[in-house]
Image (cartoon, helix red, strand yellow):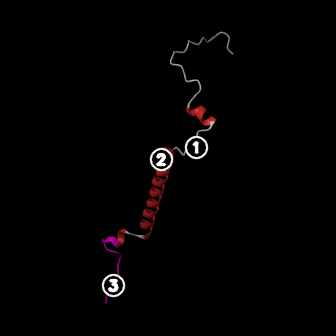
Amino acid sequence: MTTTGPPGPGSAGILRLHTVAWGALWFVVVVAFTAGVGVIQAAGAAGAMPPLTSNVESVVRPADPPSSAPEPPRLIDVANPG
């Protein structure tokens, strides 16, 4: 007559269903992210990326870049606020 007890220190106690499920989920997420980055890089290298719109270009490449000259001092009239 044999009795069954809790799983021993072997791999049966470590690899539970939820552990395997979380591992599989992370594997899928990492593979999908890596594949997405690869597709974007390949499209950019092939010149197949769409051009930036004018709204985005104005943010990325400002029409009037800031000057490196120092700003003139601002005078504040304390006696006459507003």
The amino acid at mark 1 is Pro
Number of residues whose C-alpha sits closer than 10 Å to that of mark 1, classed few (under 14), some (14–19) or many (20 or more): few
* Percent of width and height locating residue 66: 55, 22
> Which residue is disc 2 drawn over?
41
Q: Is residue 12 magenta?
A: no
Disc on res. 36: none
Image-based side of 42 in relation to 75, left or right: left
Depicted 5 relative to depicted 47: above or below: below
Image-based side of 5 in relation to 67, left or right: left
Chain part drawn in magenta: 1-11
Disc on res. 3: 3
Outermost residue, bottom side: 1
How far, Cα to Cα, is label 1 from label 3? Answer: 68 Å
Q: Are marks 1 and 3 in contact (CB under 8 Å)?
A: no
Quarter of image, res 27: bottom left
SS of the residue under disc 1: loop
The amino acid at mark 2 is Gln
* Percent of width and height locating residue 33: 48, 53
Quarter of image, res 31: bottom left
Quarter in which the N terminus is drawn: bottom left
How far, Cα to Cα, is label 1 from label 2? Answer: 13 Å
* Percent of width and height locating residue 34: 45, 53
* First of labels 1, 2 by sequence position: 2
Frontmost residue, 80 versus 56? 56
SS of the residue under disc 2: helix
> Which residue is disc 1 drawn over?
50
Frontmost residue, 74 versus 43? 43
SS of the residue under disc 3: loop
How far, Cα to Cα, is label 2 from label 3? Answer: 59 Å
